[in-house]
Image: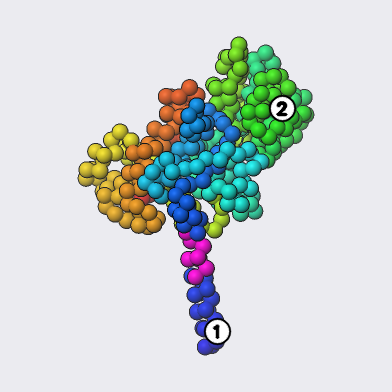
Amino acid sequence: MRNTLAATAASIVAFITSSTAMAGKDLDAIKARGALNCGVGIGTAGFMLADSQGKWRGLSVDVCRAVAAAIFGDAEKVKYAPLTSQQRFTAVQSGEVDIVMGNATWTLTRDTALGLDFTGVYYYDGQSFLVPKTLGVKSARELGGATVCVAPGTTTELNLADYFRANKMTFKPVVIEKVDEIRAAFFAGRCDVYTTDASSLAATRAANVPPPRTFDDFVILPEIISKEPLGPVVRHGDSQFADIVRWALYAMVEAEEHGITSKNVDEMLKSDNPAIKRILGVTPGMGKALGIDERWVYNIVKQVGNYGESFDRNVGKDSPLKIDRGLNRLWSQGGLQYSPPFR
Ligand SMILES: N[C@@H](CCC(=O)N[C@@H](CS)C(=O)NCC(=O)O)C(=O)O
């Protein structure tokens, strides 16, 4: 009995010690380095694109900026690493980057067998097809026998095979790793169709059509053939860091729900509303629970904006992409963006 108790006590101590050692390991490294290493794509307008000064912008980039604002109080403390779809998960597994914001779809096997954690959904997407109008196709069901440009190591590749098989059609894949080379191949006519997430097709159509052809020479077919919930990816093992990433994204959504914007956040610090006081750290507690500064949400909203501001500026109505909020509306407006309570 005594031995069993002693053994139980020892294993509890071992568990606590090991879980404490695990907690904060990656976070400690990030703090010591003074910057968050953020893996992004090669370049997709509205989501992740370096401008002429080399400054990365986009909805996906904004999540890394929010995490840096939460940890350092400074959204600029991010180093970006452009990665292809093939490279992105290895880069986070090996520690080359702390987080991947490469429009990665949350799937069961990626979340488990790859040793990764998805910490939310910053964009509810789905796979579609981009074709030149000259192809004369109005529906994906007419694509039998087509050559299809697709990136390797993606859910896109798998859904493509499923979709054609389910609809008893054949296709010829043209598999190319780098997104800029896929676009070049598609625009050069090496494939009839380009398939990827509809968001990325909208970006390609808005920003990458080589003149003299324009936006209007291409169409995105109406079928959405899959669910592509795009989320931040971290590696297993540091729950504290994963929690910060998860709640930094929720903070952007929660701020939108409460009408807190980058423009009014200073005013909002004086609000009497108890929920707003908790969110902005005027009533302390949320920061302490995450092990970061109580001003973390203030810093995110002031420097990055709330979710709706980031969406509108980068991919929505105030951007060249003009993507409808659709599923990415707040839950209170009929969409799926929903933050658990800040309390
Ligand atoms: N969401 C899909 C596909 C995402 C993906 O990586 N697509 C690539 C190739 S089409 C892309 O859009 N990359 C953006 C970039 O490199 O800028 C997945 O997670 O497998």
Side (left or right) of 175 relative to 302: right
| Residue 275 seen anywhere in this rendered image of the structure | no
Give the class, few, some or many, for how many residues have Cα within 10 Å of label 1's Cα (few <14, many ≥20): few
Q: Nearer the viewer, residue 334 or 280?
A: 280
Tell me which image quadrant ligand 1 sits in.
top right
Query: Could you tell which of marks 1 and 2 lies nearer the N-terminus?
Result: 1
Mark 2 secondary-structure assignment: strand
Please state the extent of the stretch shown in magenta in the rendering. Answer: 17-24
Above or below, 18 against 59 in this view is below
Q: Nearer the viewer, residue 274 or 178?
A: 178
Amino acid type indicated by mark 1 = Thr
Amino acid type indicated by mark 2 = Val
- Looking at the rendered structure, the number of numbered marks drawn on it comes to 2
The residue under the point 37% across, 49% down is 341
Which disc number belongs to residue 148?
Answer: 2
Whole-percent x, y for residue 131 in the image: 65, 21
Mark 1 secondary-structure assignment: helix
Q: Which residue is label 1 attached to? A: 4
Dominant SS type (magenta): helix
Above or below, 69 against 21 in this view is above
Is the residue indicated by label 2 positioned so its CB lies within 8 Å of ligand 1? no
Which disc number belongs to residue 191?
Answer: none
Question: How are the colours assigned in the image?
Answer: rainbow
Above or below, 186 against 264 in this view is above
Whole-percent x, y for residue 209 in the image: 59, 19
The residue under the point 40% across, 55% down is 290
Whole-percent x, y for residue 136 in the image: 68, 14
Q: CA distance from mark 1 to mark 2?
A: 63 Å
- Tell whether label 2 touches label 1 (CB within 8 Å): no
The residue under the point 50% across, 32% down is 54
Side (left or right) of 53 relative to 258: right
The residue under the point 65% across, 17% down is 132
